[in-house]
Image (cartoon, rainbow, N blue to C red):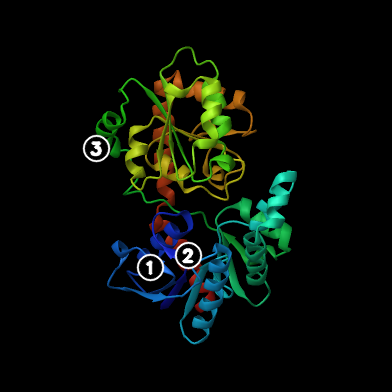
Amino acid sequence: MNIVFVTRSYTKKGGISRCVVELAEKFSQDHSIHVFTNCWDKDLIRANIIFHKIKAIFWPFFLKVFSFVWCGSRKLKTSSFDLVIGPLGDVSKADILVAHSCHRAWIEIKKKDPWERLKYWLNPLHHIVLFLEKNSLKKGHYKKIISISRLTKNDLGKYYQLPEEDITVIYNGVNTVEFTPENRNRYRPGLRQELGFSETDILLLFAANEFKRKGLRTLLEAVALPMQNAPVKLLIVGGDSPDRYTGLIRKLKIKEQTYFCGPRHDMNRFYAASDVFVLPTKLEPFGLVITEAMASGLPVITSRLAGAAELITDGETGLLLKDPENPGELQDKIFKLVRDAGYRDKMGANASAFIQNYSWDRIAGQYEKIFGGLTG
């Protein structure tokens, strides 16, 4: 089959774009793959993947988003392919829409806060994204919707009254070759030495590009609570600014325990160097970092509001928070893992073994079944 993937960017540096890359590379083994995109990572160029440049207005960002969808739609109208696949919001019409989130659901949460509600009305990006989302979910604009979690499927049904049979849940996969417990021996000693950690330090890892939504404040407050002098250190990886947290860190007296590393593209090394992965997110449609950490053999603490939490058995393959804004609850779960190395190791091993069921090879096989129903 001639299959088109539509995505604003084709890179492994973002969650949605990484999913597109993983699927495109899997399907390129048996199909002819075309990628309609505004930009792509030259390191990801493959002989059997053809790239089509979709122009977009560079700035402001809301016009870049809108112009990409508009130009992509025009390009698709003049082309002929067997199957078009695109993330919800990146394409106007597609055979398969992949819903990585429901923007309307996130907006409804933000609007509960008066300041956030004001920012919503003043920011044209939200209005553009909501328009594109609603437009692509119209009858006749898709043949099938794949949701990356039950959480997102429920949101789509709630806010857009979509027929349940239109939506199939297929969880995002994880690269079980790149993220593996074997990385611990390969990277752990060197990276710990590079960052100035000792082998006796118990390292908590937080990775996100939106610190506020992903719950960094709650995590900082939890780390500041008593842990019986355990050598706990917090490593924070991500592209968000640490400036708004410096005052809080100083107030909590945890400056010596807290390390900001900025954005990194070698996350497999950071999982390998850490002991526990923590993401007390307020809302996360999925969370690739959660399954990557699990595949790396780390015990995970996250919120039940994360889509990937649907893959965690509480107490066996991870620990789930009822309230992601409760530092006391989070501290309790952290300390359970901090004080018992055997419990940490067992949970990490359980998580790694379980998440093998969600390798990209297996996820691609589930997509193939959808293809058969649409083209057979």
Of labels 3 and 1, the one closer to you? 3
Residue visible at 40% across and 52% down? 359
**Location of residue 60 in the rendering, given as x and y in whole percent from the top left corner:** 55, 64
Whether pointer 1 and pointer 2 mark residues with C-beta atoms closer than 8 Å, the reply is: yes
Amino acid on which disc 3 is placed: Arg
Q: CA distance from mark 1 to mark 2?
A: 10 Å
Q: Amino acid at mark 2?
A: Tyr
Residue to which mark 1 is pinned: 27
Side of 314 where 269 appears, left or right: left
As measured in the structure, the alpha-carbon distance from the residue carrying label 3 to the one carrying label 2 is 33 Å
Horizontal side of 265 relative to 169 (left or right) equals left
The answer to which of marks 3 and 1 sits earlier in the sequence is 1
Between disc 3 and disc 2, the foreground one is 3
Q: Which residue is mark 3?
A: 186
Please tell me which residue is depicted at 64% across the width and 65% down the height of the picture: 128
Disc 2: CA contacts within 10 A as few (<14), some (14-19) or many (>=20): some
